[in-house]
């Protein structure tokens, strides 16, 4: 994994932990992104809804990379995406790198994470 990406990601995690508590990992951050994208605020989610929120987060993160296209929301306001381009085969390390970079890009685009120049 790119050392610079990992350092930036750990800086973001520390920033998020101030608001959401210690112990955030990639999965917890994906859940937070999914909740944010759903736009209904926090509530008690069922197990299948938590899985769906993680899927929403992954689609949202990979949309700017050309892998998914947002196609709209259903009557419960859940966002839906269409697969546009398959991801190339990636090993676990490469997957983590891609997701961490995409998470950094997401929080930068939301104005939540700013990197020092």
Image (spheres, helix red, strand yellow):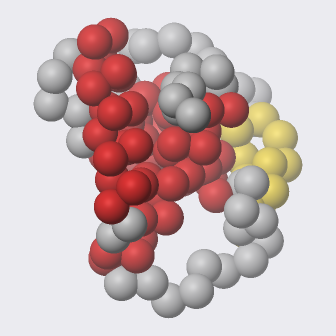
What residue lies at 31% left-to-right and 76% top-to-bottom?
92
Q: Quadrant of the C terminus?
A: top right
> In the image shown, does 78 or 97 lie closer to the viewer?
97
Between 13 and 5, the one nearer to me in the picture: 5
Residue farthest right in this picture: 71
Q: Position of residue 107 (x, y in %)?
A: 56, 32
Q: Residue at x 49, y 64 (%)?
A: 98
In the rendered image, the residue lying farthest to the left is 23
Q: Does residue 19 appear to the left or right of 101 in the view shown?
A: left
Residue beneath the point at 24% across and 41% down = 25
Residue 23, picture quadrant: top left
Q: Which quadrant is home to the N terminus? A: bottom left
> Is the residue 55 above or below the residue 17 in the image?
below
In the picture, residue 111 is in which quadrant? top right
The x and y percentages for residue 21 are 21, 16
In front: 5, or 38?
A: 5
The single residue placed furthest to the bottom in the displayed view is 89
Q: Nearer the viewer, residue 112 or 40?
A: 112
The percent coordinates of residue 54 (x first, y second) are 45, 46
Q: Residue at x 43, y 13 (%)?
A: 42
Q: As displayed, is residue 53 above or below residue 38?
A: below
> Is residue 43 shown to the viewer in this render?
yes
Q: Compared to 23, does 101 lie above or below?
A: below
Q: Residue 44 at x, y = what percent?
A: 33, 17
């Amino acid at each position: 994994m790119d050392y610079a990406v990992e350092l930036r990601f750990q800086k973001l995690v520390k920033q998020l932990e101030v608001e959401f508590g210690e112990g955030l990992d990639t999965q917890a951050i994906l859940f937070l992104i999914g909740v944010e994208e759903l736009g209904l605020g926090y509530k008690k989610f069922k197990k299948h809804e938590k899985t769906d929120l993680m899927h929403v987060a992954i689609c949202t993160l990979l949309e700017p990379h050309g892998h998914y296209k947002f196609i709209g929301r259903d009557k419960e306001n859940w966002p839906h995406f269409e697969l546009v381009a398959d991801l190339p085969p990636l090993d676990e390390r490469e997957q983590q790198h891609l997701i961490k970079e995409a998470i950094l890009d997401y929080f930068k685009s939301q104005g939540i994470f700013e990197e020092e120049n």
